[in-house]
């Protein structure tokens, strides 16, 4: 299949091309068009031209376009899913879930509206809060959920009247390009566009005065660069960054029930989720039973090509991340006890079996850093206050979980966790109507919910005298 950029309503070649590698084989399987600076500037100009007419439509006028786009994506759901598995690596069933989540996100936002809100009405005055679109939005997305995370930016930005330029990660550009191909037949020219790069156009988009808002999901170091480049124009931005999410198991929890949930939370999408379980704190008396159960689950997991039936854990998405994870495992081997996994795969591709590590000190790399892989440290505690303090001792604050047989006690512990989201007795539950975002260095702003829509708008207060 030949892939094209979408610029100003036309599907066009890039200035050059980049190879896209299937992480299950480590070999290129497709080529993607690569945009240059001139094409990026054309896209910005086209988005600015398209903005006034798109913004002038009311919500009902924009809603129909979003609903058509959702229907068209769903009609090609299997094409999207297979492509996601090939470029990202996740098992095909998980890829199908991502596609249908993308359709659902688009459908959800198509139905939403930010209506004017009366703040005060008296005999003397009427004060109303209104929301209007910002302009051109640059949506910069990572490689772990290339389609769903993009739609969580595109859908609220479009329905509120903005135009959008999508820039995917260079290792997973194809599903975004396929989305552009579908959108080209539905949306007006310039309303949605796609640019692929080698991480060399992000600074241009972030700094360009014609871009009004940058919505970025990715690592904290890159987020700092986005924030710095956006500062000269004081543009609006949303940053959803890294996490090192702690799971705290209370002493009244049932290990047999908790272990499968924690294992799934740590290994779904090969652990490549910003809100995945990244470290576990367990009462010392539970450690042996918990590690034994996690090791059993790791041994039962089927690691392989996501297109192969029965695969439950696919490869790490790219070589750079794969090599980073191998280095983390070697550091953990030297400083702790590996109770499952830990050995490199003999097959081609970037495969890492689920790895469980115990007896690590709190300053070990696997505890301090975000691994973004199915490699999980399990840490013992003797005092709950100490466990909470250790969980909070991080530059990150994206998510966390508490596991207990006493929900009220779990909620009380959750109230002491310094992160944007804390689940009790569940994990990765992210309904579209509930906002999420990070504390500390895990981000600024909110995605999803009405708050996520509001991030793509400017508040205007109309204050009128009635007398």
Image (cartoon, rainbow, N blue to C red):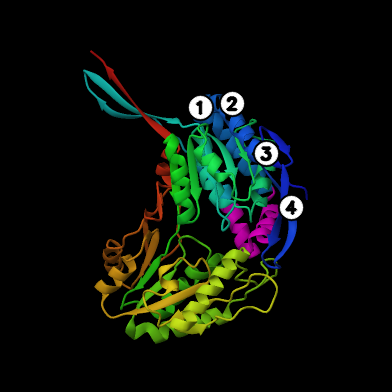
Q: Which residues are magenta?
A: 76-101
The reply to whether discs 2 and 1 touch (Cβ–Cβ < 8 Å) is no
- In which quadrant is the C terminus drawn? top left
Question: Going 48% across and 78% down the picture, which residue do you hit?
Answer: 331
Question: Going 61% across and 37% down the picture, which residue do you hit?
Answer: 192
The spot of residue 108 in percent (x, y) is: 51, 44
Residue 360 found in image quarter: bottom left
Query: Mark 3: few, some, or many residues within 10 Å (few <14, many ≥20)?
Result: many
Q: Is residue 309 left or right of residue 148?
A: right
Query: Mark 2: few, some, or many residues within 10 Å (few <14, many ≥20)?
Result: some
The spot of residue 199 in percent (x, y) is: 59, 50
- Which numbered circle lies on residue 49? 2
The residue under label 3 is 6
- What is the C-alpha distance between the residues marked 3 and 1? 25 Å
Is residue 107 visible in the rendered image? The answer is no
> At numbered mark 3, what does the secondary structure look like: helix, strand or loop?
strand
Mark toward the start of the polypeptide (3 vs 1):
3
Mark toward the start of the polypeptide (3 vs 2):
3
- What is the C-alpha distance between the residues marked 2 and 1? 18 Å
Query: Mark 4: few, some, or many residues within 10 Å (few <14, many ≥20)?
Result: some
The reply to whether discs 1 and 4 touch (Cβ–Cβ < 8 Å) is no
> At numbered mark 2, what does the secondary structure look like: helix, strand or loop?
helix
- Which numbered circle lies on residue 58? 1
Question: Going 48% across and 68% down the picture, which residue do you hit?
Answer: 265
- Which numbered circle lies on residue 31? 4
Is residue 138 inside the magenta stretch?
Answer: no
Is residue 100 inside the magenta stretch?
Answer: yes
Question: Going 52% across and 30% down the picture, which residue do you hit?
Answer: 60
């Amino acid at each position: 299949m030949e892939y094209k950029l979408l610029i100003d309503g036309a599907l066009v070649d890039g200035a050059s091309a980049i190879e896209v590698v299937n992480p299950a084989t480590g070999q290129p399987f497709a080529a993607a068009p690569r945009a240059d600076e001139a094409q990026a500037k054309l896209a910005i100009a086209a988005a600015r031209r398209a903005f006034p007419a798109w913004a002038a439509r009311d919500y009902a006028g924009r809603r129909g376009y979003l609903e058509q786009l959702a229907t068209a994506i769903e009609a090609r759901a299997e094409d999207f899913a297979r492509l996601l598995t090939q470029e990202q690596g996740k098992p095909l069933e998980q890829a199908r879930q991502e596609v249908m989540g993308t359709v659902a996100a688009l459908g959800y936002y198509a139905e939403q509206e930010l209506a004017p809100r009366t703040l005060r009405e008296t005999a003397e005055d009427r004060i109303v809060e209104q929301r209007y679109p910002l302009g051109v939005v640059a949506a910069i997305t990572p490689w772990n959920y290339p389609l769903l995370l993009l739609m969580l930016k595109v859908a609220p930005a479009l329905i509120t009247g903005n135009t959008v330029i999508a820039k995917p990660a260079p290792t997973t550009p194809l599903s975004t390009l396929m989305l552009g191909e579908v959108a080209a037949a539905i949306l007006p020219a310039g309303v949605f566009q796609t640019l692929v790069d080698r991480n060399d156009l992000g600074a241009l988009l972030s700094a360009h005065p014609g871009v009004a808002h940058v919505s970025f999901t990715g690592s904290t170091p890159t987020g700092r660069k986005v924030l710095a480049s956006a500062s000269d124009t004081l543009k609006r931005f949303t940053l959803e960054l890294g996490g090192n999410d702690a799971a705290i198991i209370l002493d009244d929890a049932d290990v047999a029930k908790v272990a499968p949930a924690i294992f799934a939370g740590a290994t779904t999408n090969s652990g490549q989720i910003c809100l995945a379980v990244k470290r576990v704190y367990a009462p010392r008396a539970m450690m042996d039973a918990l590690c034994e159960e996690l090791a059993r689950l790791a041994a039962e997991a089927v690691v392989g090509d996501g297109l192969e039936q029965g695969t439950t854990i696919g490869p790490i998405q790219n070589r750079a991340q794969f090599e980073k994870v191998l280095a983390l495992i070697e550091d953990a081997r030297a400083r702790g006890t590996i109770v499952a996994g830990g050995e490199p795969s003999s097959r081609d591709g970037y495969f890492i079996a689920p790895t469980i590590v115990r007896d690590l000190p709190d300053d070990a790399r696997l505890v301090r850093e975000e691994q973004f892989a199915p490699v999980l440290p399990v840490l013992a505690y003797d005092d709950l206050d100490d466990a909470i303090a250790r969980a909070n001792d991080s530059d990150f604050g994206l998510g966390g979980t508490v596991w207990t047989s006493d929900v009220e006690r779990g909620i009380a512990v959750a109230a002491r966790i310094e992160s944007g989201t804390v689940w009790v007795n569940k994990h990765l539950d992210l309904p579209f109507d509930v906002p999420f975002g990070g504390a500390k260095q895990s981000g600024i702003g909110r995605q999803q919910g009405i708050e996520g829509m509001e991030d793509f708008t400017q508040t205007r207060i109309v204050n009128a005298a009635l007398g």
